[in-house]
Amino acid sequence: MCYIALIYFFSYFWMAITFNPKEIAENLKDLARSFPAIDPDAGRPEYLEKVMIPHTYVGAAFLAIVAIVPTVISASMHVQPNIASFYGGTGLLIAGERGLRPDPENRQPPGDARLPGTARTLERLAQGRVTRHQQAAGRKRPAGL
């Protein structure tokens, strides 16, 4: 429980140090950006501060879950802690980020609507199609791949 409290404390502490709503409001004003129904001159910093507090709370909750997953797995499934540590921390953050980021190589072309991403990639490899990055570098895929 102390671990989770520390995560929340340092999340809000980090937000307080790095997030300056007045500076961000000035940058938005310079770029001529606005929020609907918010006074461009007076209301921006207060609105930004009001919005960041719940976002920080949700972010801290996610980090707390990521941090306690190895402990929960180890205790509930009787798995050794060194093995359970693969299911949390940095590995879970990387897997989640990778799952959320769109992969430009697996974008679905209009004619391949029937194939999932992995099957499309394998079909492209079998047909010898090159990727966008390889086209830019002037290379083609080796015939054996």
Image: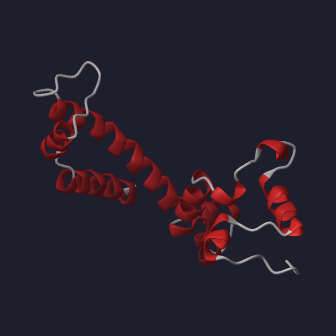
For the point 67% across and 72% down, the residue is 134
Indicate whether 15 appears above or below 145: above
Q: Is residue 1 left or right of residue 48?
A: right
Position of the N terminus by quadrant: bottom left
Task: Tell me which colouring the rendered structure shows.
Answer: secondary structure
Q: In which quarter of the view is residue 17 placed?
A: bottom left
For the point 58% across and 51% down, the residue is 100
Position of the C terminus by quadrant: bottom right
Residue extending farthest to the left is: 42
Tag count = 0
For the point 17% across and 42% down, the residue is 21
Q: Is residue 134 left or right of residue 49?
A: right
Q: Is residue 145 left or right of residue 22?
A: right
Q: Nearer the viewer, residue 76 or 63?
A: 63
Residue extending farthest to the top is: 37
Q: Is residue 122 left or right of residue 15?
A: right
Q: Nearer the viewer, residue 124 or 87?
A: 124
Q: Position of residue 82 (x, y in %)?
A: 60, 78
For the point 18% across and 31% down, the residue is 44
Q: Nearer the viewer, residue 116 or 79?
A: 116
Q: Position of residue 119 (x, y in %)?
A: 85, 57
Indicate whether 11 appears above or below 110: below
Residue extending farthest to the front is: 138
Q: Nearer the viewer, residue 89 or 15?
A: 15
Q: In which quarter of the view is residue 121 placed?
A: bottom right
Q: Position of residue 43 (x, y in %)?
A: 15, 27
Indicate whether 109 appears above or below 41: below
